[in-house]
Each structure stands twice: as C-alpha cells, then as structure tokens.
C-alpha cells in the first residue's frame, strides 16, 4: 500500500467503507466514481467523479504517479477492464462461506486470462493471491483487491 498514490472506489464501496469506520486522509488521493451528488459530510480530500473511465484515465496519466488501488463492485472493475487499465489483481480469500455477495467482475467479462505471480498465507487463514492480467503492458499499474 505504500506505493499507492491514488485510491479509486465505487460509490457503494465508499459508503460501506465509511459505515465501517474508514478514514480518508490527505496522504493519498481518493476518487469515488458515482452518478449521485457528493454526499454531505464527505471529507474534502475525497474527489467524486461521474466522468467516463477513459476520460478519467487520460487525466490521471497526465499527472504524477501511476500506482492505483481500485476497489469496487463488479461494474467499476469491468469498466476498468474495458479500458485495459488493470494490470494486476490482488485477491484475498477469507476462510468463511457467506453464500451471497457482489460479483468480482460484471457478467460481461467471462474470460480474463491471469497469470499467478504470488501467494501469501496469513495466520488468520486468509490467503492472498496476486495475479497479473495477461497481455497487459506494464506502463500503467492498477490493482484491485477483493475479499472473496
């Protein structure tokens, strides 16, 4: 996380994070994709946008920094995949079956070839899998983490 300079979240993920007590400081840039108006009480350090992913990416690429942490539901992940803007998935497998949840990727993405980079097991039973998206060049790095 120390290499991350921009966090990108979907609106529902942002709202769930706030409910769970997440703090959004000024050390890293936070951008929330939302078609809804900026919520009252949102920290001034959090940027809200409804621009298309491609426009956002072009604007982001013009600035400094390239390490982005993307966290959201299946639609925002699919939108970034459509823009060929995800180089790596970091997926945490939590040892609990919940029986329901939000898809990692929207249904329109049925085939995304991945290459396993590494695995890490934690004392609490969580296993973290790091995958490279095959066929992506390394000029733009974007990471998505999801608890499955």
Image: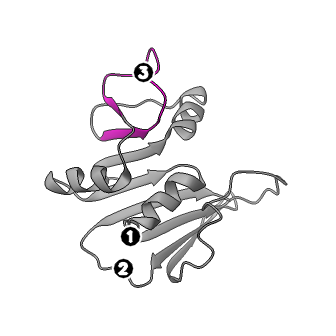
- Residue 44 counted in the magenta span: yes
Most extreme residue toward the top, as rendered? 40
Q: Quadrant of the C terminus?
A: bottom right
The residue indicated by pointer 2 is: 136
Q: Which residues are magenta?
A: 29-48
Above or below, comparing residue 75 to residue 86 in the picture: above
Q: Residues at badges 2 and 3 in contact (C-beta under 8 Å)? A: no
Measured as percent of width and height from the top left, residue 135 is found at 39, 85
In the image, residue 121 lies at what x, y percent?
Answer: 61, 69
Question: What whole-number distance in Å separates the C-alpha atoms at marks 1 and 3?
Answer: 30 Å
- Give above or below for 71 relative to 82: above
Q: Give the image's coloring scheme.
A: one colour
Relative horizontal placement of residue 72, taking residue 23 as reference (left or right): right
Instruction: Compute the Cα span from label 2 to label 3.
Output: 35 Å
Residue found 30% across the figure and 28% down from its top = 45
Residue sitting nearer the eye, 98 or 74? 74
Dividing the picture into quadrants, the one containing residue 51 is top left
Residue assigned mark 1: 84
Give the distance between the C-alpha atoms of the residues marked 1 and 2, in whole angstroms. 7 Å
Name which of mark 1 and mark 2 comes first in the sequence: 1
Mark toward the start of the polypeptide (1 vs 3): 3
Residue 6 within the magenta-colored segment of the rendering: no
> Splitting the image into 4 quarters, where does residue 50 fall?
top left
Q: Nearer the viewer, residue 3 or 132?
A: 132
Please say if the residues under marks 1 and 2 sit with CB atoms less than 8 Å apart: yes
> Where residue 61 sits: x, y (%)?
20, 57
- The location of residue 18, given as percent across then percent down, is 54, 28
Q: Residues within 10 Å of mark 3 (few under 14, many from 20)?
A: few
Q: Which residue is mark 3?
A: 42
């Amino acid at each position: 996380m120390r290499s991350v300079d921009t966090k990108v979240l979907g609106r529902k993920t942002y709202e769930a994070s706030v409910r769970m007590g997440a703090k959004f400081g000024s050390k890293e840039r936070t951008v929330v994709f939302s078609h809804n108006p900026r919520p009252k009480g949102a920290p001034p350090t959090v940027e809200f946008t409804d621009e298309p992913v491609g426009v956002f990416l072009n604007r982001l690429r013009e600035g400094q920094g390239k390490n982005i942490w993307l966290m959201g539901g299946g639609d925002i992940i699919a939108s970034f995949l459509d823009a060929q803007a995800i180089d790596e998935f970091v997926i945490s497998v939590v040892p609990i079956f919940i029986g329901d949840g939000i898809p990692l990727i929207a249904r329109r993405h049925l085939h995304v070839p991945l290459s396993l980079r590494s695995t890490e097991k934690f004392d609490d039973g969580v296993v973290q899998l790091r995958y490279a998206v095959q066929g992506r060049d390394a000029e733009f790095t974007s990471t998505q983490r999801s608890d499955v």
